[in-house]
Image (cartoon, rainbow, N blue to C red):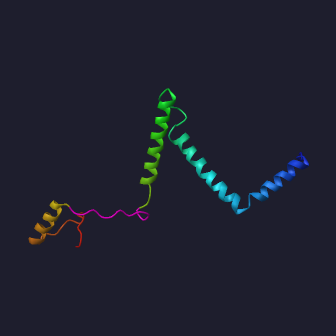
Amino acid sequence: MGFPPRELHDLQLRVRAEQQTPEWKARYAVRSGVESTVNEFAHGHGIRRCRYRGQGKVHVQHVLTAIAVNFERLGGRSPAEEAPAPRQPTAFQNYLDNYLDQREIPRPKSWRTLGS
């Protein structure tokens, strides 16, 4: 068993105390988010191995991969976060609804109707 030099021990104590402050935790949260994104690119999308040669083509591959990841992240949001506005029925749907109503034909439950 060995003991570190006094200077190293004092430095470790000072750094560990600093890591308990809210300012340090806020800075580290940003770093943690960046590192997780880099890890996702490297391991999930194989960004370390490029399909093309040349800096320009590699750059385009990286940009397109980043766009795809952003689409994946936007598509993964829950409906409670951003509920899209319901679409207005088309003219055909309005006609069909009126036709069914006039003949008192029940609509299937899968049909989306407004105001009914």
Residue 69 in the figure: left or right of residue 86: right
Q: Is residue 87 magenta?
A: yes
The residue drawn where x is 82% and y is 56% is 14
Q: Residue 95: image x %, image y %?
A: 13, 64
- Where residue 92 sits, quadrant-wise, is bottom left
Residue 90 place in picture, x, y as percent: 19, 60
What span is in magenta? 79-89
Q: Residue at x 51, y 42 (%)?
A: 44
What secondary structure characterizes most of the magenta part?
loop
Residue extending furthest left? 103
Q: Does residue 114 lie above or below 1 as drawn?
A: below
Asked if residue 81 is among those painted magenta in the image, a careful observer would answer yes
Left or right: residue 79 compared with residue 92 = right
Establish if 31 lies above or below 44: below
Q: Residue at x 82, y 52 (%)?
A: 12
At 78% from the left and 56% from the top, the residue drawn is 16
Q: Say which quadrant the N terminus sits in.
A: top right
In x, y percent, where is residue 116? 22, 73
Q: Is residue 44 above or below residue 73?
A: above
How many dots with numbers?
0
Q: Position of residue 79 (x, y in %)?
A: 40, 62
Instruction: Please indicate whether residue 62 sits to the left or right of residue 102 in the image.
Output: right
Q: Residue furthest front?
A: 56
